[in-house]
Image (cartoon, rainbow, N blue to C red):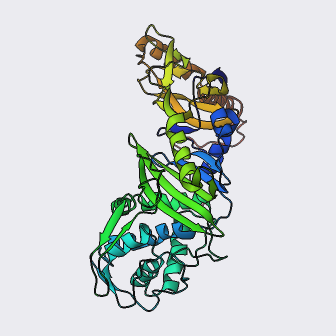
Amino acid sequence: MKHYRLLSLFLAVVLVFSMASPLSAQAEDLSQFSQLVADMEIDAQAALLVNMTEDEIYYEQNAYDKVYPASITKVMTALLVLEAVERGDLSLDTEITAGSETWLDIPSDGSTQNIQIGEVMSVENLLYCLLLPSANEAANILAQAVSGSVSSFVELMNRRATELGCTGTHFANPHGIQDEDHYTTCYDLYLIARAAMSNETFRTIVSTDSYTVPATNMSEERTFSNTNGLLTSKKYSGYVYDSCIGIKTGSTSDAGYCLLAAAEEDGTILISVVMGAETVVDNDGTHRMQFSESARLLKWGFSNFSYHSILDLDTPVAEVPVTLGVDVDSVLVVPSGTLEALLPNDITADSFTIEYETVDSVEAPVEVGDVLGTLTVYLEGEAYGTVDLVAAASVEQSPFLATKKAVEDFISDNWLKAAVGLGVIVVLVIVLRLTLFRPKRRYGNYTGTRRPRNYKGSRRR
């Protein structure tokens, strides 16, 4: 096994041959080797920052601890409604009549758009009511439309959470009103957000700063603003972050102030989760920490991580002996593909090693790309990526050397020796049998009287 120090590498090995470590370990590993990560701290109960484009964690803070999601719950509600639309069970234009469960378990001080039982509104307009001003009754109305009842919809929410890989989540309602049996984790919220953000309609809605619902059978038109202060200052001023593209606020006395946010720069989408932040009032005014801390976390992620090329096709790693070659007795091996890593900008080369193994030798002919070994990249003993090592050049076979070896192999092969030995034994046995055990002719003295051929004696009468 060979060991070498390697320039700039870290966890998120981005290539076909990746040996990606579990997401839950990556940010913790990063903090051991990056002062940028180690020094980062969010003023909230729990937080998470993930590169959604590459599905790689940048930062985590109590990301797997139990938290209350409050109205961020409505992201799952919207996801299930839009999946029903994709299945053809509903359409965005489907007119829904608010049913008997419209106000089920919703307190009088909850966020609302005052949608009344019997009021008719399209699925699309209900989704805008759900996600921008966070109308709790819209969640119940949509739940009934999808599953027939709120309770059946909640069962669907929990099944879908499990399918998405959520292990610390249990839903008790579709809107997020406080319930001890209604909880999640930062990481589970990321999984739900990742699924929702793959839907174009969802992304359009959560990135909208304000919207007008046309007049209905029971109401004049409604105009409202997004509660996400990173998107618009119409509700909360001083927090707008131009790169923000969503997603959802949430707050209760038990959950604190929460924000599930997304931002996009140069084709890369980061998702931040900040749970249990506080609102601070001081001489400078009111500071809503869920917005300021989310913006700080997102900006930090874009500023402090970048891709670095670690290995490429032109980097020879080792030399493998070649037999039977024409004027060549070795061949260089190179990585079979490029190796890139998503690194905090302060990680240095000294942290990384490579280990490789090659075959002891190879027999010509050798073709470019023949696999002759493997190379693994390590960070303090933990493997982060493996690639094949392949021949960098072709080697022709020498006909003379190949023939000479074939003859030598024929003579030296053990099976031939055994066959010849067995043949000799067989021949000896045959010879011995013929010479020592051949039956002899018997010779003796004849005492009787022979009759001559022309004997004419007389018969006895």
Residue at the image position 72 percent from the left and 36 percent from the top: 444
- Relative to 153, does residue 128 appear above or below in the rendering? above
Q: Report whether residue 393 is seen.
A: yes
Count of all numbered marks drawn on residues in the image: 0
The x, y position of residue 15, in whole percent, is 47, 38
Locate residue 254: give its quadrant.
bottom right
Residue at the image position 48 percent from the left and 77 percent from the top: 136
The x, y position of residue 39, in whole percent, is 67, 38
- Relative to 10, does residue 408 appear above or below in the rendering? above
Frontmost residue, 117 versus 446: 117
Frontmost residue, 65 versus 166: 65
The x, y position of residue 184, in whole percent, is 61, 66
- Relative to 342, does residue 455 appear above or below in the rendering? below
Locate residue 206: give its quadrant.
bottom left
Residue projecting furthest to the top: 327
| Quarter occupied by the C terminus | bottom right
Q: Report whether residue 34 is seen.
A: no
Residue at the image position 43 percent from the left and 21 percent from the top: 365
Locate residue 415: give its quadrant.
top right
- Relative to 390, does residue 154 appear above or below in the rendering? below
Frontmost residue, 134 versus 460: 134
Residue at the image position 44 percent from the left and 92 percent from the top: 100
The x, y position of residue 454, in whole percent, is 50, 42
| Quarter occupied by the N terminus | top right
